[in-house]
Image (spheres, rainbow, N blue to C red):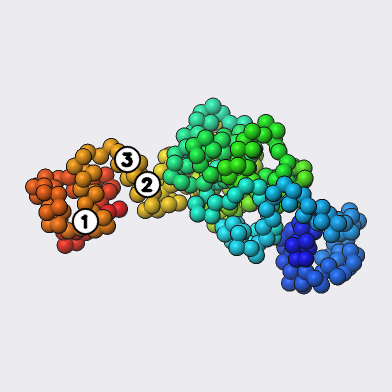
Amino acid sequence: MDLIYKLALSYNEYIGPKRYKEIKNYGLNDFFSLNYQEQMQFLKIKTEKAIPFFKNMLIEAEKIEKICKKESIKVIEIESETYPPLLREIEDAPFLIYMLGDFNYSIKPLAVVGTRNPTEDAKLINEYFTREIVSYGIGIVSGLAKGHDGIAQKIAIENDGWTVAVVGGGVDVIYPLSNASLYHQIKKKGCIISEYTPGTYPLKQNFPLRNRIISGLSCGVFVIQAPEKSGSLITAQYAELQGRELYTIPGNVIDPSYSGNNHLIQRGAKIVVSPEEIVFDILGKKAQKIINKKEEHLLSQEEKQLLSLINKEAHFDEIVIKSKMLPERLNHILTLLELKGYLEECAGGFYRRL
């Protein structure tokens, strides 16, 4: 019965995270034992516009449950182990989310956002950064909107990456229609998330609230290109409030399409000029290991041979014996591997794999 109650509350647009907490503290069963007038009184809601939402909550909840079963829409409660862990951390996390597709709990996600009207140079920057970031196994979170959101998610899918689309309507409502093909691809290879019940049309006022989820799901937010009035800047504000790292690229100071970027930099956003700067922030030392694997095919035969002899850590003398190299030559190759970031020289003549 708890789930039906929560579906009912999710349907009611007058009940958000704050009022849900009040109801939960009072007790779900106790709250639903009240009539609709008492429920409104308890929540101090006086507007007559709210009456239909309270009167019809349980009837609508049963309809929502049937739709979710029919359309394979997952309903995830904030108390559930399957609720995205980063999202749960934020103060105004939705108490219920709807999901189409599969959430990947094993990878770290980055939000990539920007204007719906990108310039040609910014499109190329987005494609380059997203392609590289995805190649390190980082997920992409965005809003399936026209412009930079759709570009980032399209590039992620095309490069075998995983992406989450957070939408401002029901997860079963395709919006915008121009991104219908991308919507279906994400549903198969990533997931679509919303706090709004299935069938909800994406109203304009839903999108600013949606942006807190984009940021909340992510380790950081990367603003590709934002004019002074942009929804991306709302996502950036949420990132700051939620303690997420905020990244952006500097833009031409006389180009209004980059004015938001430059203002973010003034406020303390981290300037990035290469994808690896974001990658190292998110993955730390693991990023270097991935770089090493990527570049391993460029190593000489001698370099590859030495790396194969050092599992985790080995002493110089042990490597001399195993490699059958002259000490002078061995020392030269080990130095090259250090410079390339594969090895670290430790005290006592030991070498450690990175």
Q: Give the alpha-carbon distance from disc 2 to disc 3, as whole Å.
A: 9 Å
Mark sitting earlier along the chain (2/1)? 2
Residue 55 location, x and y as percent? 89, 59
77 with respect to 28 (left or right) = left
The secondary structure type at the circle numbered 2 is helix
Instruction: Please name the amino acid that badge 1 sits on.
Output: Tyr
User: How far across and how far down the image is residue 212, in percent?
Assistant: 64, 51
Tell me the amino acid under the disc marked 2: Ile
Q: Decide which of 121, 203 is in the foreground and name it.
A: 203
Question: Quick one: label 2 or label 3, which is nearer the N terminus?
Answer: 2
Locate residue 228 relative to residue 283 in the image: left or right: right
**Residue at x 60% of width, y 63% of height:** 81
- Residue to which mark 2 is pinned: 290
Q: Which residue in the protein does label 1 denote?
A: 351
Give the alpha-carbon distance from disc 1 to disc 3, as whole Å: 20 Å
The quarter in which the N terminus is drawn is bottom right
Which disc number belongs to residue 295?
Answer: 3
146 vs 155, left or right, is: right
Q: Residue at x 70, y 33 (%)?
A: 177
Q: Quadrant of residue 165?
A: top right
Answer yes or no: do the residues labelled 2 and 3 have beta carbons within 8 Å? Answer: no
Residue for point 52% across, 46% down: 139
Residue 130 percent coordinates (x, y)? 49, 39
The number of discs equals 3
> Is any atom of residue 6 visible in this view?
yes
